[in-house]
Amino acid sequence: MSDRPTQMQAREATKRDWHDTLTIRQVVEEYGIPENTLRWWRKNGGGPDEFPTGFTVGRSVRYRRDDIDNWFQTQYERAASNVS
């Protein structure tokens, strides 16, 4: 028996990934990062410590929630290590 996912499992994983993306507005609302800051970071190739630049779908910019959460976790860990 193969460990490879079936086509249906692959489609479901892709669907979950798509539903776990955020628009600029959602990032602003959920994470409190100002919209102009997000746009500036994206235009100039990332923000502090290479904040995820996202990707476009048509004319809409999307960010993967996991990428933003990982970035915040890295910032937290870096700040915590500087305090100790």
Image (tube, helix red, strand yellow):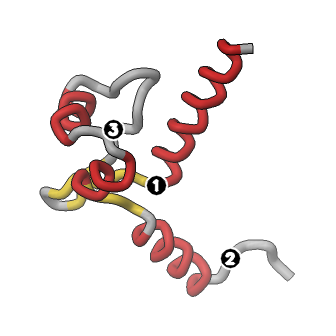
Comes first in the chain, label 2 or label 1: 2
**Amino acid type assigned to the residue bearing label 1 in the image:** Arg
Residue situated furthest front in the rendering: 83
Residue wearing tag 3: 53
User: In this orientation, which residue lies closer to the viewer: 14 or 36?
Assistant: 36
Three-letter code, disc 2: Pro
Q: Quadrant of the image for the C terminus?
A: top right
Q: CA distance from mark 1 to mark 3?
A: 12 Å
Q: Which residue is the site of mark 2?
A: 5
Amino acid under disc 3: Thr
Q: Residues within 10 Å of mark 3 (few under 14, many from 20)?
A: many
Quarter of the figure that contains the N terminus? bottom right
Q: Marks 2 and 1, Cα distance to the nearest angstrom?
A: 23 Å
Label 1: which secondary element: helix
Q: Residues at badges 2 and 3 in contact (C-beta under 8 Å)?
A: no
Q: Real-space Cα distance between discs 2 and 3?
A: 29 Å
**In the figure, 39 relative to 77: above or below?**
below
Q: Nearer the viewer, mark 1 or mark 3?
A: 1
Q: Which residue is mark 1?
A: 65
Q: Is residue 27 left or right of residue 35?
A: right
The crowd level at tag 2 (other Cα within 10 Å; few <14, some 14-19, many 20+) is: few
Report the front residue among 33 and 22.
33
The residue drawn where x is 42% and y is 26% is 50
Q: For the residue labelled by badge 2, is the local secondary structure a helix, a strand or a loop?
A: loop
Callout in the foreground (2, 3): 3
Percent x, y for residue 10?
A: 57, 76
